Amino acid sequence: MGTGAPVSVTAGADRYPEHNQETAMSHQARPDEAQEPETPHLDFQGTTPYEDYVQADVLTHLQHTLSDDPGEMVFLVTTQVMELWFTVIVHEWETAAKALRADDIPVAVAALKRSVRELEALNASWRPLGQLTPAQFNSYRSALGEGSGFQSAMYRRMEFLLGEKSASMLVPHRGAPRVHAELEKALHEPSLYDEVLRLLARRGHAIPASVLERDVALRYEPSPEVQAVWTALYAGDDSDELARLGEALTDVAELVWRWRNDHLVATRRAMGSKTGTGGSAGVAWLEKRAQKNVFPELWTARSYV
Ligand code: HEM
């Protein structure tokens, strides 16, 4: 990354007077110290290596608000921040699915555990929007037109990885070829949960053929036989690799459920029972979505352990 030439310490001192003062004070305390600490390099041939890597200039100029309301900025940025977290989480779950396919449980669990911390950060991003009043939301709501998070392709990829597949969710993206192609690929790939169940079968657990050979482009439906497998695993040694995999998946499921519920409560506060900008019944529709269990048998098995 280091393409730039270093510039003299004095230039750094001009730029960061506070830093310099602090350094001078610490020098008084230690008169024997001859040299000041090096300040960062200032001079680069082109854009900074930081910019080349992070593309902060691109990222911080993507905030095109649609109204004059000062409160819209945080709504837009929170949505963008959540899109970035969705992207990281999809990456982790795809890593986990690939590792499971290769029977590498440690790599899969490591990716799932990273995603748990990322989901916590994602959920914490509700804070700036959690207490919006209807009047505040109304100040820019009409400017959103028919725009809705329902049209988020990256959120849909998360749902697909969890097993919540639906071909009709591709329809809104027909006009965006790259997004549509990525979503279509994700629809036809086994979900993270499909990979988990295939691995359980390879390890000798009685996952039925109807589950193993199911059409992966359809929504996963719970199976009593799969529930029995998780029940047996949970009744056994809880340090077992597969029981630990089950718990990592349960952590993921819980945090996804929390995201849905935080979204539901924020929506109820901001717009009551009005219809959504995306055309749904709003809160009533979101309530139904929030009731869906992620990795269903990991929850129902608990009643039988
Ligand atoms: C407090 C502000 C928000 C309100 C009032 C709100 C409202 C709604 C409503 C009513 C729906 C149902 C679809 C529709 O008719 O539009 C929806 C869906 C959705 N929203 Fe929000 N939303 C808010 C903030 C956000 C943010 C910040 C995100 C982040 C990306 C987001 C992501 C989503 C997603 C992914 C869906 C689809 C959920 C699903 O398919 O189950 N929303 N939202």
Image (cartoon, grey):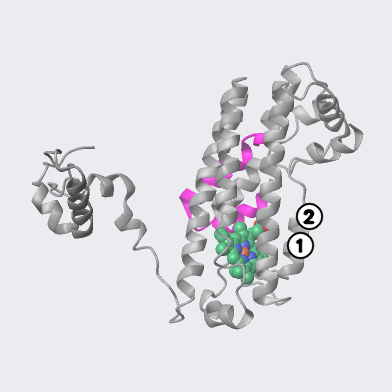
Q: Which mark is residue 18?
A: none
Numbered disc 2: secondary structure: loop
> From the image, which quarter does the C terminus lie in?
top right
| Magenta span of residues | 166-192
Q: Residue at x 24, y 37 (%)?
A: 1
Q: Residue at x 59, y 47 (%)?
A: 119
Residue underneath mark 2: 291
Q: Position of residue 131 (x, y in %)?
A: 62, 71
- Determine crowd level at label 1: few under 14, some 14-19, many 20+ residues with C-alpha closer than 10 A: some
Q: In the image, 153: left or right of 259? A: left
Q: Position of residue 16 (x, y in %)?
A: 19, 57
Task: Check disc 2 and give the amino acid type.
Answer: Gln
Residue 173 in view = yes
Q: Main secondary structure of the magenta part?
A: helix
- Determine crowd level at label 2: few under 14, some 14-19, many 20+ residues with C-alpha closer than 10 A: few
Residue underneath mark 1: 287
Ligand 1 located in image quadrant: bottom right
Q: In the image, 111: left or right of 168? A: left
User: Quarter-wise, where is residue 65 in the image?
Assistant: bottom left
